[in-house]
Structure formats: C-alpha cells, structure tokens
Image (cartoon, grey):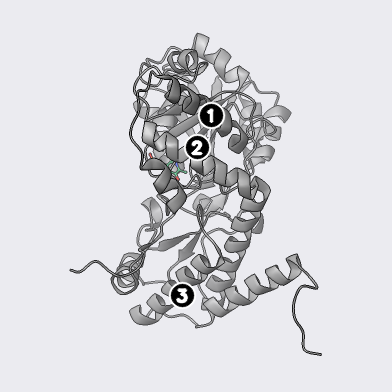
Amino acid sequence: MPTPAGRHFLQIPGPTNVPDRVLRAIDRPTIDHRGPEFQRLGQEVLEGLKAVFQTRQPVIMFPASGTGAWEAALVNTLSAGDRVLMYETGQFASLWKAMAERLGLAPEFLAVGDDPWRRGADPQAIEARLAQDTAREIKAVCVVHNETSTGVTSRIAEVRRAIDRAGHPALLMVDTISGLGSVDYRHDEWGVDVTVAGSQKGLMLPPGLSFNAVSEKALAATRSSRLPRSFWSWQEMLGPNRNGFFPYTPSTNLMYGLREALAMLQEEGLANVFARHQRHAEATRRAVRAWGLEIQCLDEAEHSPALTAVRMPEGWDEAAYRKVVLEHFDMSLGSGLGKVAGKVFRIGHLGDFNDLTLIATLAGCEMGLALAGVPHRPGGVAAAMNWLADAHRAASPGTFVTRS
Ligand SMILES: *Cc1c(COP(=O)(O)O)cnc(C)c1O
C-alpha cells in the first residue's frame, strides 16, 4: 500500500496531532540529565506546568502514560483496604476503579440513573453518600473530569462544594487526562487534592509523560499512606525536583516538546485556547444534529469541549463506519469503548486544532456516512461552517465588507 498523500487526520481524542513546533523542539540531542543545561529545562517545565493546572503547588511528572499517574495518585495517599468513592461516568472511570481494586483498595462505584454513561458525576449523590458515611471510612472521592469514552464533563467545582457541604474529610482526586490544555481546569480554585493528567491529549505532545498536581492535604496524606510505592513515590520526586532534577532518567526529549507546548498555550492565552475548543465543540454538535444523529451526552451543561461522542443509528456498527472513513479519507476517528463499543464513535477536537481542521474532519465524517450508507441527512458540514462564520462575525463586528 502506498503512503497516502497529505497529512493523516488523527481525530481520535488522544493521542492528538503533534504541532510541527513541538516535533521540531523534540528533534534535538538528548543531554546529560544531571547537567546544568538539563537543570534549566527541568526548572522551566516544572514551573511552567503550574499555569496549565492553575496551581501554585508542585506538579509531579512521570515518564509514563496517564495510567501511571492514576496509580501514583492512589498509592501515594491511601492504604490497603481504604474505601474510595469513585463515580461511574464511563470506560475511563471503570478502568480507574479496576486499578483501585487491584491495588487492594475498596472502591465503591457510584452511579445515578439507568444510563450513567451519558451524564457527569452528580454532586448531590456524592454529598448524600458522604453524609451517610458518619464513621468517615471513605478516604477519597475520585471523578473523571473529561470522560473520554462518552464526551461528558463533570462539574468539579460543584463536586468540591458537595464534599464540603457534607463536612467530609475525603480527598478529592480528579482525572483530567483528556481535558488539560483544552478544557478550563482549576486545581487550586476548585480545591482538588490530586489531579491526574497526561501528555498526549490536550497538551499536544506524544504519549509518554503524565502528571499529578497535588494539594498540601494530599502531600500530608503521604505520611499516613501505607500502599507500597517506589517508582511512583512523590517524596522521591519532590526532593530532586526542587533543583530541576529527577530521581531517575526523565524523558528529556519529551520535555523539550513540553517546554514548546507550554509556550504555545501561553502565547495564545489559556482563556483563548478554552474558547477555541468550546467553539469547535459547538460547531461539531451542530453538525451531528444536522445529520440527525444523537449525541451521547444528555446534559447541555456537560458537553465536552474536547471531543464529541456520536451514537450510531440502531443496528449500525461504528467500527465498520470508521473503517470506511479510514480507508477512503485517511482519517482516524475514536472507537466505542467498553459498554458503548459498536454503538458510539468519537470525534476528537482537542489539542492543536483550528476551524479548518474541524471542517475537514466533519467533511470526512459526512462523506463516510454517505459512503457507508448510514442513514443520515446531509448538511452537517454546512451547519458547522455557518456557525463558525457567525462566531467570527460576532467576535469582530464591523470589520466585514458590505456592499453599498
Ligand atoms: C487517555 C485516558 C486515560 C489513560 O491514559 P493512558 O495515557 O492511555 O494511560 C485515562 N483517563 C482518561 C480520561 C483518558 O482520556
């Protein structure tokens, strides 16, 4: 098979397209990770990361995929047999819970309604469950901020307020692996104790780095936590990190890329980055509705700015549809995961992404629907184009040429 011409469209919700600037930054010699040049790099990225997490606390970085940072969050703060309240939002919440079980914790999976995979975490349900826990046995509440399997975001600030209303001391741990860098996230303001993130989604990097942002309360919890940890130990990291160094060999070249990605986010301005993804998410939803297809997320307040999960018409298989799109248009769309395998496909609009990337992505989706014979109405791309043009017009009124 010849290599297809042009760029592959990687529109899965992670890994995402790595911008040329980041690729070029990575393409440099690996240096001595105990030397002065590395030290400057280490200090710069560890400090620069705080802005994306919106925290003043340390951010701990592991040479690992996001799953590693999930494990680090649990093993640094908890002990065998500890109860943890985990909220069922989708496949990633389910995988985190399975990990908690394997680590010897006692997770309780909270879900509300008959289809929890279509909504975010319910703050009232969390409050009610914590209020029942008069013996204070629950040590942590774990929520996925941007559930990548469903395209639903949870309202983390409201979850924090729910925990506070219950007067419960549990730690709040949040996975924003696919949100960070594309979706507004405020570690300090929202009172999150441990935030889990990764490099290959909103941060526009290749896979291979993951992060924990921590609170003082989370750091204090390490002293009483008894789960075994070595590679994942925050304490082992924080000592050398103070001088920009790491206890073992860090991913030097990914850190060059991270420095560049952080610079790109700062140059655009985080508020503008978040608004850009909101705009693309809205345009995507307009396209999906114009096609007459259903969006997985049911609550208007919980649509993900990073990806949209689309339900196939009854009896139509998403895998067969995605195969048509890949073979004809060299575009990868996200598969259905876990309970929604076969039923849902996902359009990633996170990371390095602009209006025309979106329109091309939606065009690939719409042509694919036609080619695969999936029942739909045409006009999704046009609906998205109209909405984007309107958004530009509204953002700069008076700058458009009119006929006199
Ligand atoms: C991608 C993802 C993960 C898993 O991260 P890996 O880097 O694949 O280990 C966990 N949670 C969410 C929400 C994700 O999107």
Q: Name the residue under label 1.
A: 44
> Could you say whether the residue bearing mark 2 is in a helix, strand or loop?
helix
Question: Callout 3 environment at 10 Å: few (<14), some (14 to 19), or many (20+)?
Answer: some
Please state the horizontal and vertical placement of residue 188, each as a whole percent of the image: 66, 30
Q: Is mark 3 on a helix, strand or loop?
A: helix
Residue 30, placed above or below residue 235:
below
Q: Residue 91 carries which label?
A: none
Q: Is mark 1 on a helix, strand or loop?
A: helix
Q: Is the residue 370 above or below the residue 48 in the image?
A: below
Mark 1 vs mark 3: which is more N-terminal?
Answer: 1
Q: Name the residue under label 2.
A: 259
- C-alpha gap between disc 1 and disc 3: 40 Å
Q: Which of marks 1 and 2 is nearer the N terminus?
A: 1
> Of the residues under marks 3 and 2, which one precedes in the sequence?
2
Q: Which of 130 and 17 is in front in this view?
A: 17
Q: Which of the four quarters of the rendered structure image does ligand 1 lie in?
A: top left
Find out whether the residues at labels 1 and 2 contact each other: C-beta distance under 8 Å. yes
Residue wearing tag 3: 363
Q: Is residue 313 visible?
A: no
Could you tell me how far apart the alpha carbons at marks 1 and 2 are, in whole angstroms? Answer: 7 Å
Question: Image point 43% across, 30% down: which residue?
Answer: 69
